[in-house]
């Protein structure tokens, strides 16, 4: 492998690493051991089918059920037998291991085993069968698919291969127009009129409108009519939902800082017979509750209405709608939204229609309930397909330290999105704190340490138990983190043992507070003009630009309501100074000249010149990454240190290489990598014109 190229762990290395962690070396949802004493065992194919129909998994041949290494005689012969059988259509309907990278001979305990990595089959290919029988993985076992399992797999297959198929489009037998809650429909139509600049259905009565939006339809072929499942779920009365969907459970629970409350929760919204808690009403009640505690900026839209533009709000809105839209409503269905001091949790029954890595990458969308999705789209809750995950990830990372995560459970199938609060109110302070640390301190910090620091900055001070409530880790782990941060001199404590109160050391806290003074920043779409700490005297009001930026994109300089009007007051980059009624931006001595603005000569390099310094593998990786419309967080956090290994790169150069805005790269990735000790700054001050970054070798 060439220097600078991304390292990919092989299947053999993955198995050896797994074997070294004895506590994980046991059969489970994604790991199966098979003895090879009698050759290729017949029940291997049951695991093959089960993994492909569930979440994928690893079959290791030559290991006993208890994990003891037995080894495989003639491993290449066993591999040939496996490939021949997988390619035999009378035995198996699809070969899931058609790549050499998915099969490996692995030396373990002075013996050889054979590993088969079985990927999760795409929904369009499932069910994967052997001898015309399909299997599903349940814990450590492979179970033959029931009629219900096959119905689920076939329904998910239809979602993918047929554009006109949607699980929520089925007519609910026995329902009529009278099963619609008219108050819900009135509220929905009002919101539709408020969102749409022109309501094309304003002249329609309610019954006509329900037919137009596919909430009610007639099936001439089947000779029946009624509410669609989408119509019932979105607009149904309490009585109709209780009659036709008694298994539906919608639940919102909010927990406070006081864990001694008898019920646990301090607020709850759930569906029952006393009110029409359909999907639309549930969303309308729960979304405002989720936003409480996250301040909304004052922004007016073109109609002079206040518009919710805070990225975290948009992420919450999308996550809530995502749970309602992608839930599996056939059979028992539960949607649970939890608001905790540590963050938000969105759960819904159902399985993923794409692999996790495909979902997090963004751009692809497979919707189980297209009708419900469209009903939310009509009122502006969601946007076009494929953009939702990007809004969740990017919106949350804009304001928090930790990215959202997605997890799944089986039996029953549950999809869970977690949006952690860490850094929500202190992200800027966290990075200021890290910037003020010595190099040896920064290099020793990891993400767990940074989360604890964000909690202490949020709360000013916290006890061990308070931290555990916000960051549910084992008490011993929290104790180790706190002890480490104390030894590094970043935090201090008062009291004894678990009763101790922890807080940021005063010397660092004073630096943060000092840096926060006059903290109004003017964004230039990611490009700032550093005034080196000099101030702009505008009728006695000064703009301290030591850490603040000069907005060159909106033609105005907003300083607490005082603006620098460019109509007559021009920033002439051709060698003239910034004339503001006789006051010049020159600290009383010098003017801005010729638009050079401290740009280093190296920053003027073309993209081709910059790419020329890399080997071919890394060059291809940079080209592929820069061409993508959406980035995976982990891949970029690995790529940037590769680019900066052995040399310094400025933000401008990284922006040119990666085809992204400078501020976007700095705020999303550079600050994070510096905090983790993966990158080192050339200059102490972020706004130093000579600032650049290089990778720190592990």
Image (cartoon, helix red, strand yellow):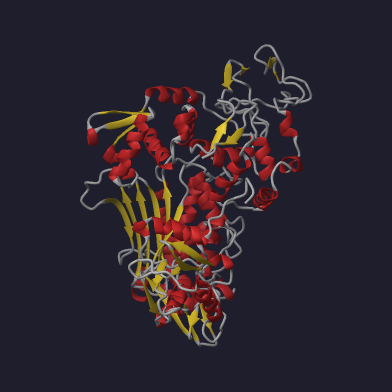
Looking at the rendered structure, the number of numbered marks drawn on it comes to 0
The answer to whether 251 appears left or right of 563 in the picture is: left
Who's the residue at 49% across and 41% down the image?
399
- Residue 104's spot in the image, x, y percent? 52, 66
Who's the residue at 20% across and 51% down the image?
262
The answer to whether 480 appears left or right of 234 in the picture is: left
User: In this view of the protein, can residue 516 be seen by the observer?
Assistant: yes
- Residue 301's spot in the image, x, y percent? 58, 45
- Residue 66's spot in the image, x, y percent? 32, 67
Give the vertical position of 98 relative to 341 (above or below).
Answer: below
User: In this view of the protein, can residue 169 be seen by the observer?
Assistant: no
Give the vertical position of 695 relative to 172 (above or below).
Answer: above
> Which residue in the rendered view is the most extreme toward the top?
589
- Nearer to us in this view, 410 or 383: 410
- Nearer to us in this view, 144 or 352: 144
- Nearer to us in this view, 234 or 97: 97
Residue 161, picture quadrant: bottom right
- Nearer to us in this view, 272 or 361: 361
């Amino acid at each position: 492998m060439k220097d600078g190229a991304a390292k990919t762990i092989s299947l053999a290395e993955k198995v050896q690493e797994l074997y070294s962690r004895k506590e994980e070396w046991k059969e489970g949802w994604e790991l199966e051991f098979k003895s090879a004493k009698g050759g290729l065992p017949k029940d291997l194919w049951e695991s093959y089918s089960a993994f492909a129909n569930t979440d994928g998994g690893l079959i290791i041949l030559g290991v006993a059920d208890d994990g003891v290494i037995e080894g495989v005689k003639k491993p290449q012969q066993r591999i040939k037998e496996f490939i021949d059988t997988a390619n035999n259509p009378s035995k198996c309907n699809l070969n899931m291991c058609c790549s050499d990278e998915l099969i490996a001979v692995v030396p373990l305990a002075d013996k050889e085993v054979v590993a088969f990595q079985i990927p999760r089959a795409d929904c369009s290919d499932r069910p994967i069968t052997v001898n015309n029988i399909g299997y599903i993985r349940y814990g450590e076992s492979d179970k033959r698919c029931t009629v219900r399992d096959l119905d689920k797999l076939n329904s998910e297959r239809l979602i993918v291969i047929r554009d006109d198929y949607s699980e929520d489009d089925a007519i609910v037998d026995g329902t009529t127009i009278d099963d619609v809650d008219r108050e819900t429909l009135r509220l929905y139509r009002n919101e539709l009129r408020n969102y749409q600049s022109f309501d094309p259905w304003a002249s329609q009565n309610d019954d006509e409108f329900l037919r137009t939006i596919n909430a009610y339809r007639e099936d001439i072929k089947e000779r029946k009519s009624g509410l669609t499942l989408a119509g019932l779920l979105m607009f149904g009365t309490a009585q109709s939902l209780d009659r036709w969907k008694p298994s539906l459970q919608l639940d919102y629970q909010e927990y406070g800082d006081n864990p001694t409350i008898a019920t646990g929760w301090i607020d709850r919204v759930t569906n029952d017979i006393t009110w029409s808690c359909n999907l639309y009403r549930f969303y309308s009640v729960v979304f405002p509750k989720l936003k409480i505690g996250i301040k909304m900026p004052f922004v007016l839209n073109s109609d002079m209405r206040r518009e919710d533009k805070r990225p975290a709000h948009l992420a919450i809105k999308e996550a809530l709608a995502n749970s309602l839209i992608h839930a599996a409503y056939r059979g028992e269905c539960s949607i649970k939204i939890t608001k905790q001091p540590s963050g938000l949790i969105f759960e819904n029954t159902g399985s993923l229609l794409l692999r996790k890595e495909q979902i997090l990458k963004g751009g692809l969308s497979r919707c189980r309930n297209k009708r419900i999705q469209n009903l939310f789209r009509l009122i502006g809750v969601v946007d076009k397909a494929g953009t939702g995950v990007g809004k969740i990830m990017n919106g949350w990372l804009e304001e928090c330290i930790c990215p959202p995560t997605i997890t799944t459970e089986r039996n029953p199938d549950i999809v869970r999105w977690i949006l952690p609060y860490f850094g929500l109110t202190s992200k800027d302070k966290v990075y200021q704190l890290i910037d003020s640390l010595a190099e040896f301190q920064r290099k020793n910090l990891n993400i767990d340490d940074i989360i604890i620091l964000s909690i202490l900055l949020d709360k000013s001070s916290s006890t061990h138990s308070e931290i555990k409530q916000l960051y549910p880790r084992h008490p011993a782990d929290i104790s180790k983190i706190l002890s480490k941060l104390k030894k590094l001199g970043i935090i201090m404590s008062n009291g004894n043992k678990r009763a101790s109160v922890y807080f940021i050391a005063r010397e660092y806290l004073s630096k943060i507070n000092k840096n926060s003074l006059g903290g109004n920043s003017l964004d230039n779409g990611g490009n700032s003009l550093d005034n080196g700490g000099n101030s702009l005297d505008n009728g006695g009001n000064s703009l301290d630009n030591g850490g603040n930026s000069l907005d060159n994109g909106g033609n105005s300089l907003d300083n607490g309501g005082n603006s620098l009007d460019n109509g007559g007051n021009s920033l002439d980059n051709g060698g003239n100074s910034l004339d503001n009624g006789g006051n010049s931006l020159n600290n009383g001595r010098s003017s801005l000249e010729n638009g050079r603005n401290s740009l280093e000569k190296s920053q003027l390099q073309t993209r081709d010149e910059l790419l020329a310094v890399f080997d071919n593998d890394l060059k291809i990786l940079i080209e592929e990454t820069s061409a993508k419309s959406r980035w995976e967080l982990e891949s970029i956090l690995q790529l940037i240190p590769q680019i900066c290994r052995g040399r310094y790169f400025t933000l401008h150069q990284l922006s040119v290489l990666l085809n992204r805005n400078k501020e976007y790269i700095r705020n999303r990735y550079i600050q994070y990598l510096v905090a983790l000790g993966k990158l080192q700054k050339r200059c102490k001050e972020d706004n130093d014109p000579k600032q650049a970054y290089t990778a720190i070798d592990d």
